[in-house]
């Protein structure tokens, strides 16, 4: 299987995940990178009328996670730790998260991600460590053409 086939299958797996029916994100995976676009709507707001931090976390973790899983073709990776820095509120437009792998060892992959508003201002950032699981990448979990 080519790298491009692996990337497309990861994207399909992501888009098929039940939680994404609620968030409606769009993911693009590359070699050690991932880009996610999350549309903002009032369903993501906290009581003060801005996007809840959980949506920031989801976008940042997903972008970092898929940048890491782009380098692993046999199994699903798991988030071991994730640090998040919330920098500014947002209440409209799209959120764009960009993730990239910054370090890789036999056991752990470290990836960073940055979240931007629709004016390309950084609104949050995060970094995480990821490790291989025992869950094979198969059609049963949505990893398919």
Image: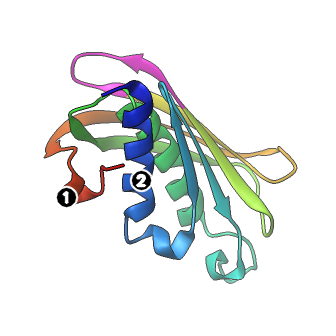
Query: What residue span does the magenta drawing correspond to?
Result: 100-109
Label 2 CA crowd tier, 10 Å (few <14, some 14–19, many 20+): some
The extreme left residue here reads 134
* Quadrant housing residue 10: top left
Vertical relation: 41 (above or below) 65: below
Label 1 CA crowd tier, 10 Å (few <14, some 14–19, many 20+): few
Residue displayed at 78% across by 52% down: 117
Secondary structure mostly seen in the magenta stretch: strand
- Return the residue nearer the eye: 77 or 90: 77
Vertical relation: 98 (above or below) 106: below
Residue 37: in magenta span = no
| Residue at the spot of label 2 | 12
| Residue at the spot of label 1 | 140
Q: Quadrant of the N terminus?
A: top left
Camera sees residue 7: yes
Q: Position of residue 66 (x, y in %)?
A: 43, 40
* Quadrant housing residue 53: bottom right
């Amino acid at each position: 299987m080519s790298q491009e086939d692996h990337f497309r299958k990861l994207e399909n797996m992501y888009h098929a995940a039940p939680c994404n029916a609620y968030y409606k994100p769009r993911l693009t995976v590359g070699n050690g990178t991932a880009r996610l676009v999350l549309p903002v709507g009032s369903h993501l707001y906290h009581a003060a009328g801005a996007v809840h931090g959980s949506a920031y976390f989801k976008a940042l973790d997903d972008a970092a996670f898929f940048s890491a899983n782009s380098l692993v073709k046999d199994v699903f990776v798991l988030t071991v730790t994730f640090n998040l820095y919330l920098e500014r509120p947002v209440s409209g437009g799209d959120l764009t998260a960009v993730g990239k792998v910054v370090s890789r060892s036999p056991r752990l992959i470290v990836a960073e991600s940055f979240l931007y508003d629709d004016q390309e201002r950084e609104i949050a950032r995060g970094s995480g460590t990821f490790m291989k699981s025992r869950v094979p990448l198969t059609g049963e979990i949505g990893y398919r053409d």
